[in-house]
Amino acid sequence: MGKISPVSAKYIVHTSIQIEGVVDRPDVIGAIFGQTEGLLGSDLELRELQRSGRIGRIEVDTDIKTGKTEGVIIIPSSLDKEETVIIAASLETIQRIGPCNAKVRVLKIEDIRISKRLYVIERAKELLRTLQDDVLPDSQEITDEVAQSVRMMNITEYGNDRLPAGPAIDESEEVIVVEGRADVLNMLKNGFNNVIAMNGTSVPQTIIDLSKQKVLTLFVDGDRGGDLIIKEAMGVAEIDFVIKAPDGKEVEEITKKEIHKALRSKVAAEQAKMEIKDVPKRSEVIRKTLPPRTAPAQQSAYGPRKVLPARTMSASSSAVSPRTASAAPSAPRPAEKKSALGSEQQEKFKQLLEDLIGTRGAYILDDKLNILGKVPTSELESTMKSLSTGIFAVVFDGSITREIVDVAERTKTQFVVAMDSKVKPAETKVVLLTSMNF
């Protein structure tokens, strides 16, 4: 290329020459300037254009074969395209170089900006691949890592009951009480640090003690279960205000905007009590749904003694009424004995549960505690139904619900492990474990 600035050069004229004889390079250069002089007027005079830098240094490359000279002429140009093609066409008017006849033909006019643009595109693709592979992590990985670190950093255990809580319980005058650990995590994620979980279906002593010292706001799910918790909590603790999540939603899944809207609409405990006065207590509901208890086996020095049939008992004791005697044979069978939890299993479940904190994911395990797969919590039920058998345990970041327990019973799953549970262990033959068990 000619000695023209790469920034200003826009085009390169490629020209071939065929000479009927032997000539030197200076002869070709002299012919170019001499035979085009005055041809195009003063504005397109090659010498003036070269002196002003609008035409670069003219390169000539020749090769002598069998008494003839062949070669190429390369002229860089910073003129516009119309002027460049005029200069290129003027070269074809050269008919003699030195004492020999010559033929000059323009091969092509190269737009150097297109070449640069193609290079830029290819290089940019290469740099982007390097950036994605080696430098930038996936955006979801960044989000998950930051969210998990913030949650793990802020969540604490409070009181003798070791309840999941935010870090600002002691210094806050008002404390928000939610149902489970997942609810605490969602509140922490949205900037509420004065939150604590009951972590079960009954009100722990820690919550009762707090209610005597702090202004307690009870924040429950927007379903009938939330009404049951409100009535039961107000029966044993000094609840000041009550908040319900939007209808059909749980505290763990609502957005920051929905949380603020719910807090603005909180009502006094007495008003909430009047609104749900017809709702039975949770303990009453559970007592009605549980099967009647069968008579326990009597102990002797030689081990457990079998329970006598109803008719034998009625004959030997006047304390048993005819109605009781007739109802005894139809009493439901007790639940099967639950699988024992070994130390190795307990440690494995604890590790997997900690890995899942904040991920909203679920592990499905076989009887050797190998992970069969990982799915989102929202797809856990459908995945268990599709597998049907072969599931030994499931571990997930969320709350154990009645629906998950029902699927676990149908698929003969022995263990269900989660952050907290909305189902009592006595209500199913599946072993239910939460973070409080570890």
Image (cartoon, rainbow, N blue to C red):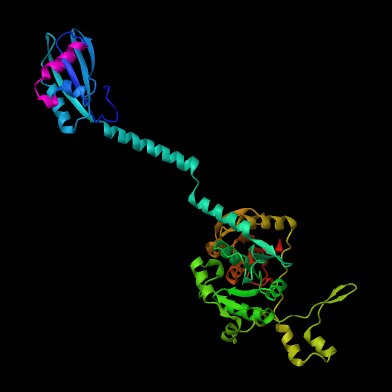
Query: Which residues fall within the magenta stretch?
Result: 25-44
What x and y, as percent, mark residue 316? Answer: 85, 88
> Between 370 and 410, which is closer to the camera in this rendering?
370
> Between 435 and 241, which is closer to the camera in this rendering?
241
Q: Residue at the right extreme?
A: 301
The count of marks equals 0
> Between 427 and 357, which is closer to the camera in this rendering?
357
The residue at 72%/87% (across/down) is 327
> Between 390 and 171, which is closer to the camera in this rendering?
171
Q: In which quarter of the image is residue 373?
A: bottom right
The quarter of the image holding the C terminus is bottom right
The residue at 66%/66% (across/down) is 171
Above or below — where is 264 with respect to 418? below
Instruction: Using the rendered image of the protein, determine whether residue 255 is visible from the camera's viewpoint.
Output: no
Q: Quadrant of residue 34?
A: top left
Above or below — where is 431 with respect to 374? below
Q: Relative to 140, is 196 on the left or the right?
A: right
Q: Relative to 357, is 265 on the left or the right?
A: left
What x and y, as percent, mark residue 249? Answer: 52, 72
What x and y, as percent, mark residue 281? Answer: 64, 82
What x and y, as percent, mark residue 140? Answer: 50, 52
The prevailing secondary structure element of the residues shown in magenta is: helix
Q: Does the magenta stretch include residue 39?
A: yes
The residue at 15%/30% (across/down) is 83
The quarter of the image holding the N terminus is top left
Q: Quadrant of residue 326?
A: bottom right
